[in-house]
């Protein structure tokens, strides 16, 4: 049975993690801390989490998904009152030097609960109230994450919802209504919910030259880094933007710009091929899964990973506004790395049990 699992997905994740370790090391060479040992530890723990997630029967987890989902909401509430702040967002729970970002694990918990709920609506088309309930399931953690001033993290719940609703059979007129509601909600968020620095990021995206040494600095430096890589790159640890400290957040949100500067078009193309292999293998898992819970869970988790890749790579070249959206398996970050490996374990667990769970 193990031979029939889409192990190409795990291979792609491991190769991406190896690229990430090398790039994190390069990006943090001139920083006070070399983040390579820490990220190496997180990858090691992530592999252990992968094994644990793969070992659990996802249908058993889905039966307890309400409790898992509720626990994730409690953790998000604790962050609001007891959380630690970093990068303008209060998103972490910490004990000493160790920090945990519950929002990353809340995405997995929400995907489990949403898969369990939608799988019980065994019809070709969802009814309107069922779509509303699904939206409320996702809205609860989104609001809590937004209250942490992490709007980027809150938005990342939407691709998961969209992918799972599409698969479950949402009616197009309801999609149009949801888009209109989202636009209205976006206007309210801009007026009442966004901090000044968040609004400035949007203004900078529209007109980056308006403040090249302030809010537009990060985007300008990122574009310079990406462009200077050209076809084959400047070479490992030879990027001026990262090594001379011009590029902020170079080991986290803008690690793709470091990769592009050092390895050029060829390096970027290789990484995108690895992401493509990961996503294609995940899609094949969904295509041959035998039960609705498994199919919905895979689509939800895979949609989240795919949108992270799409948004982060678009962000570093200025196609979308800058938010704190890291790049799966490449960006430095403990909670994010663990969540990606857990998601991979759950997806491959669906593939492993496709002949048992029907």
Image: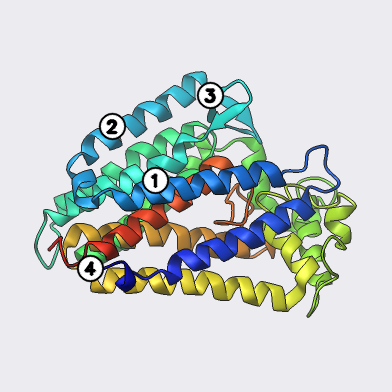
Which quarter of the rendered picture does the N terminus lie within?
bottom left
SS at badge 3:
loop
Disc nearer the start of the sequence (1/3): 3
> The C terminus is located in which quarter?
bottom left
- Residue at 56% x, 56% y is 329
Comes first in the chain, label 2 or label 4:
2
Task: Report the front residue among 287 and 139.
Answer: 287
N-term mark: 4 or 1:
1
The residue singled out by tag 1 in the image is: 107
Task: Give 160 or 198, whichever is nearer the viewer.
Answer: 160
- Asked whether residue 199 appears in the rendered view, the answer is no
Going from N to C along the chain, the mark reached first, 3 or 4, is 3
**Residue 6 visible in the shown view:** yes
In the rendered structure, find residue 83 and report the number of the disc placed on it. 3
Q: Residue visible at 62% across and 42% down? A: 198
The location of residue 36, given as percent across then percent down, is: 71, 47
Residue 335: which numbered mark, if any? none
Query: Cα distance, mark 1 to mark 2?
Result: 12 Å
Provide the secondary structure element on which disc 2 rests: helix
Q: Position of residue 268 (x, y in %)?
A: 67, 72
Q: Count residues near mark 4 (Cα–Cα under 10 Å), then give few for <14, some for 14-19, many for 20+.
A: many
Earlier residue among tags 2 and 3: 2
Based on the displayed image, in which of its 4 quarters is residue 266 positioned?
A: bottom right
Q: Nearer the viewer, mark 3 or mark 4?
A: 4
The image shows residue 328 at horizontal and vertical percentages of: 54, 56
- Colour scheme in the image? rainbow
Numbered circle sitting on residue 289: 4
| Residue linked to disc 2 | 70
Q: How dense is the environment of label 1, judged by Cα within 10 Å: few (below 14), some, or many (20 and up)?
A: many
Pointer 1 or 2: first along the chain: 2
Query: What element does badge 1 sit on?
Result: helix
């Amino acid at each position: 049975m193990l031979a029939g699992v889409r192990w190409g997905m795990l291979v792609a994740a491991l190769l991406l993690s190896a690229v990430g370790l090398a790039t994190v090391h390069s990006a943090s060479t001139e920083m006070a801390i070399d983040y390579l040992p820490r990220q190496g530890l997180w990858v090691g723990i992530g592999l252990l989490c992968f094994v644990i997630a793969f070992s659990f029967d996802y249908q058993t987890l889905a039966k307890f998904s309400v409790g898992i989902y509720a626990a994730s909401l409690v953790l998000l509430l604790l962050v609001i009152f007891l959380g630690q702040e970093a990068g303008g967002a209060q998103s972490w729970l910490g004990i000493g030097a160790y920090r945990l970002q519950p929002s990353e694990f809340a995405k997995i918990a929400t995907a489990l609960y949403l898969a369990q709920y939608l799988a019980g609506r065994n019809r070709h088309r969802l009814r309107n109230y069922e779509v509303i309930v699904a939206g409320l399931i996702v809205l609860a953690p989104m609001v809590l994450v937004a209250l942490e001033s992490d709007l980027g993290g809150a938005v990342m719940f939407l691709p998961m919802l969209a992918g799972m609703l599409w698969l479950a059979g949402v009616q197009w007129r309801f999609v149009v209504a949801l888009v209109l509601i989202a636009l209205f909600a976006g206007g309210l968020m801009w007026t009442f919910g966004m901090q000044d620095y968040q609004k400035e990021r949007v203004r900078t995206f529209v007109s980056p030259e308006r403040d090249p040494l302030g809010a537009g600095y990060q985007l300008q430096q990122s574009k310079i880094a990406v462009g200077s890589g050209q076809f084959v790159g400047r070479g490992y640890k030879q990027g001026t933007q990262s090594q001379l400290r011009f590029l902020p957040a170079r080991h986290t949100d803008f690690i793709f710009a470091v990769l592009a500067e050092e390895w050029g078009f060829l390096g970027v193309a290789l990484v995108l091929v690895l992401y493509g292999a990961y996503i294609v293998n995940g899609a094949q898992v969904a295509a041959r899964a035998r039960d609705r819970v498994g199919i919905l869970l895979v689509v939800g988790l895979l949609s989240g990973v795919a949108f992270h890749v799409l948004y982060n790579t678009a962000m570093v070249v200025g196609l979308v506004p800058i938010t704190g959206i890291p790049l799966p398996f490449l960006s430095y970050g403990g909670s994010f790395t663990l969540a990606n490996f857990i998601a991979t374990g759950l997806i491959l667990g669906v593939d492993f049990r496709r002949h048992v769970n029907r």
